[in-house]
Image (tube, rainbow, N blue to C red):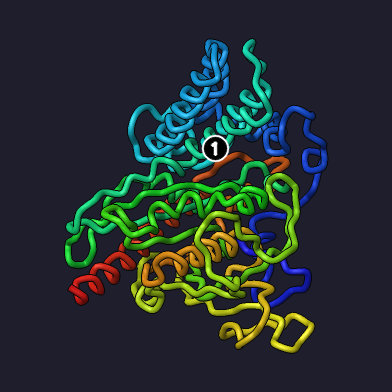
Amino acid sequence: MRRIRTRMGALGVALLAVAPLSLTAPATAAAPADVTVEEGRLTQAAPQEILRRSGFDAVEREFGRGLGRVTAYGEARRYVADEGRALWRRAVDRAQGRGPDGGDLSRDDDRPLYWARLGVTRQLRQWQPDFGLTASERGALLGSLERGSRGQDSIALPAGKHVLRIVLTGFDPFQLDGDPRRSNPSGAAALALDGTTVRTASGQPARIETAVFPVRWADFADGTVEHTLLPHFRPGPRQADLFTTISQGRPGRFDVERTNGAWRGGYPDNARESRTETVPIPAGVPTVRPQPQWTTTTLPYARIVAAGTGPFPVVDHTEVTEIPAGGTEPVDRADGPTPGSTARAGGGGDYLSNEIAYRATLLRDAVRPALPGGHLHTPVLEFGPGNTDPAHGQVTDPDFVRHRVAITDQVRAIVTVAASETAAARDTRG
């Protein structure tokens, strides 16, 4: 999820590499007043097919029936929270091979969760209960549903010195006006790895807990990243030992992003909104003051790059774009920022992937600077030859599935390498 540069630089235009952005009628059509832009895309053929072929097509209808039986706001709060968590668990179970597959769409697919969530938020947004619902109460219910269905409020790290604790995050699909069939391999990896255990090189178990974030500027400004991660960054018996935020990057390679920048470049999000500004830090969360222009990974990037984790090359990516101290124009730097410069793009660009990396590492620096963590960009997930045109293509194909599975497998291997290095460092400290 790199930024799209207004001029072609060394980073290229990885977002555009997924497929051409042919902005046809669905891209510009306004959503009805009682639904969001994202919810408005549900009427398209591709989302409906994805839901039908995964067995998630009944989720919205069943949720609406349950809402119809709710008779008080307190009951609504419980119902919505339970249903949000149940949707997340259903998607995780499907991805990990538990329960019915619900159809012929491959289990590793992250898209059923995304589209089903929009169906239930649409139901909740349009709900008019007899007992009345204020705007703030509806907003609180929608927030609860978002958090629960993204795994954000069910990260359950175990206690004890015998186990390493890892937090991993992914993203929703994005650029859906260009192609509503798109999947996000970072979200697929989050579903596949949630609640799983890997073994470090020394044999120590490492538990992985995951969450998924929206591709929306407003949610990030409201603090969704910090509020999700802070309980697990604070010192305590269940504190994380390692974290990595993950998003989709450029074709054919993984990037371990060395440096993250405090700048939003303005590319439209899934709500078709744009923000061009310094990354805003929400009130009420620990932070570093004055706000730094740059943060840095503490992942063991050299070891990850050298490890040979899978079919895709892994790159220690050091490029940034800065306005040098005393300067006025952006300059691309291959080897990181210079002292006193102003950020215009981190290694991960100036879109929400850079922003989640910046926010997570800034929070780390404010709470536990020694905590290993940073950002990983996956390869772009591409449809197979002959299936690249969204106007006539299929919602899936064998190459698309193989590519996504291979990315998830390599994410697991990369996280295992990072966990092994973290465990070894902890053993050395005693």
Apparent side of residue 112 relative to residue 412 in the rendered image (left or right)? right
Q: Quadrant of the C terminus?
A: bottom left
Apparent side of residue 377 relative to residue 301 in the rendered image (left or right)? right
What element does badge 1 sit on? helix
Q: Position of residue 256 (x, y in %)?
A: 47, 70
Q: Position of residue 254 (x, y in %)?
A: 49, 67
Q: Position of residue 215 (x, y in %)?
A: 62, 50
Q: Quadrant of the N terminus?
A: bottom right
Q: Say above or below: 287 vs 386.
A: below
Q: Residue at x 56, y 31 (%)?
A: 116
- The residue closer to the viewer here, 239 or 413, is 239
Decide if residue 400 is in sight here: yes
Q: Please give the count of numbered marks on the rendered protein.
A: 1
Circle 1 sits on which residue?
146
Q: Residue at x 79, y 29 (%)?
A: 33
Structural crowding at the residue carrying mark 1, measured as other residues with C-alpha within 10 Å and reported as few (<14), some (14–19) or many (≥20)? many
Q: Say above or below: 247 vs 339.
A: above
Decide if residue 388 is in sight here: no
- The residue closer to the viewer here, 134 or 152, is 134
Q: Say above or below: 32 vs 11.
A: above
Mark 1 residue type? Glu
Q: Residue at x 55, y 58 (%)?
A: 248
Q: Position of residue 15 (x, y in %)?
A: 66, 60
Q: Residue at x 54, y 62 (%)?
A: 359
